[in-house]
Amino acid sequence: MAKVFSVMGSPRKGGNTDILVGRIAEGAGAAGAGVETVRLGELELRECDGCHACWRGRPCSKNDDMRLLYPKVADSEVLVLGTPVYWYGPTALMKAFLDRFVYFNCEANRPMVRGKRAAVAIVLEETHAETWRPVVEFFQRSLAYLEMDLAETIVVPGVGKKGAILTQPQRLEEAYRLGSRLAGNGR
């Protein structure tokens, strides 16, 4: 049974990102995966200041909730990252979370994420690819740098109003099927 760790990078509970990531998690769970979801907006995450304590085998100098998330990321087989597009990038919550992946960038910790599969779920109000493309590229480059496998990306444009994604049942079904694929060995 695959372990799927879903990370919600939107501060808006019950919003479009929450619904989309929830459908991915439902699909994975229905296919037999163990699924855990965290909402970054409910946690205390501080910025990385590049002190590299983690590179010297010491705990992160930031005594916050990220210390609890490192083992969850390491223990998962699949990481699902969800964010709306804010100013041509991920939310500050998601960016802070990924900035703290410097922990996994050091030689001692890299094996914890190397080869790990990931999926990215992105929603946005606009409909132009030039608005969401930088976010997709951000995830592609960041995950590739850590030698992770970005298995799939789902982008749902045109859903700004809270709950607007519910008018796109075909995209929600696509997200459910994505979760099902992530739970198995298929890519």
Image: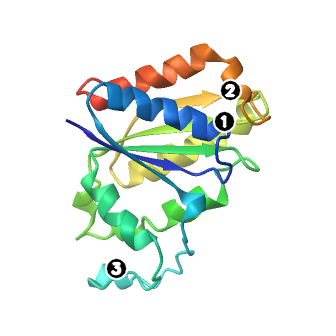
Residue 89 lies, with reference to residue 55, above or below; the image says: above
Residue at image position (65%, 60%) is 92
Q: Are marks 1 and 2 in contact (CB under 8 Å)?
A: yes
Query: N-terminal of the two: label 2 or label 3?
Result: 3
User: Crowdedness of circle 3 by 10 Å Cα count: few (<14), some, many (20+)?
Assistant: some
User: Crowdedness of circle 1 by 10 Å Cα count: few (<14), some, many (20+)?
Assistant: many
Q: Nearer the viewer, residue 152 or 68?
A: 68
The reply to whether residue 95 is in sight is no
Residue type beneath disc 2: Ile
In the image: residue 149, left or right of residue 19: left
Helix, strand or loop status at disc 3: helix
Labels 1, 3: front one: 1
Q: Which mark is residue 54?
A: 3
Q: Are marks 1 and 3 in contact (CB under 8 Å)?
A: no
Residue type beneath disc 1: Asn
Residue type beneath disc 3: Cys
Query: N-terminal of the two: label 1 or label 2?
Result: 1
Residue at image position (74%, 28%) is 164
Residue reaching furthest left?
Answer: 1
Q: Nearer the viewer, residue 70 or 22?
A: 22
Q: Position of residue 137 (x, y in %)?
A: 56, 42
Residue at image position (50%, 19%) is 174
Labels 2, 3: front one: 2
Residue highlighted by disc 2: 165
Q: Position of residue 60 (x, y in %)?
A: 39, 81
Q: CA distance from mark 2 to mark 3?
A: 39 Å
Q: Position of residue 181 (x, y in %)?
A: 34, 24
Q: Position of residue 87 (x, y in %)?
A: 76, 50
Q: CA distance from mark 1 to mark 3?
A: 35 Å
Name the image quarter holding the C terminus.
Answer: top left
In the image: residue 152, left or right of residue 167: left
Residue highlighted by disc 1: 16
